[in-house]
Image: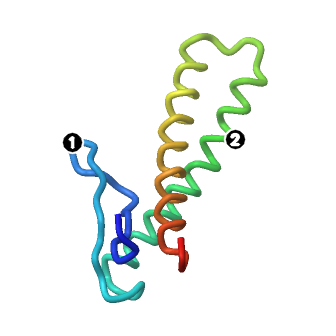
Amino acid sequence: MTNDLRLLPWTTPEGKPCYLSADGPGSLLSRLADDVEEAQLASGEQVLAGSRAVLADARAGERAVRFALTRTAESLEDVLRIAVSRGGRIPGG
């Protein structure tokens, strides 16, 4: 990826990365990507809180733990994509 391309916070239906080539951070699609990233980060915070609650509950069954882990993995994937995208936009990065 070059510094001229922004990794977007979503993938194609096949799971491949999507990139944006835009003149600047103020474009409509760039602002939409910013909003999606913020929503993903907020969701990640909620998933983390829920996962911690499940792990703290000694009575939580396998189904609850598997659900919490699945959601945590999904959120981690989103957060890592955001980190790569933002890191790629740091000058000299």
Inter-mark Cα distance, 1 to 2: 30 Å
Q: Residue at x 52, y 50 (%)?
A: 80
The front one of 57 and 29 is 29
The front one of 88 and 52 is 88
The front one of 79 and 50 is 79
At label 1, the amino acid type is Glu
Image coordinates of residue 31 in percent, x first then y, are 40, 78
User: Which tag, 1 or 2, sits closer to the chain's start?
Assistant: 1
Residue placed under numbered mark 1 in the picture: 14
Judge from the rendering whether residue 21 lies leftward or rightward of residue 51; answer left or right.
Answer: left
SS under mark 1: loop
Look at the picture and state if 59 lies above or below 2. above
Q: Which mark is residue 49?
A: 2
At label 2, the amino acid type is Ala
Image coordinates of residue 1 in percent, x first then y, are 35, 63
Q: Residue at x 30, y 65 (%)?
A: 19
Q: Residue at x 53, y 71 (%)?
A: 93
Judge from the rendering whether residue 55 lies leftward or rightward of residue 32; answer left or right.
Answer: right
Q: Residue at x 23, y 50 (%)?
A: 12
Quarter of the figure with residue 3: bottom left
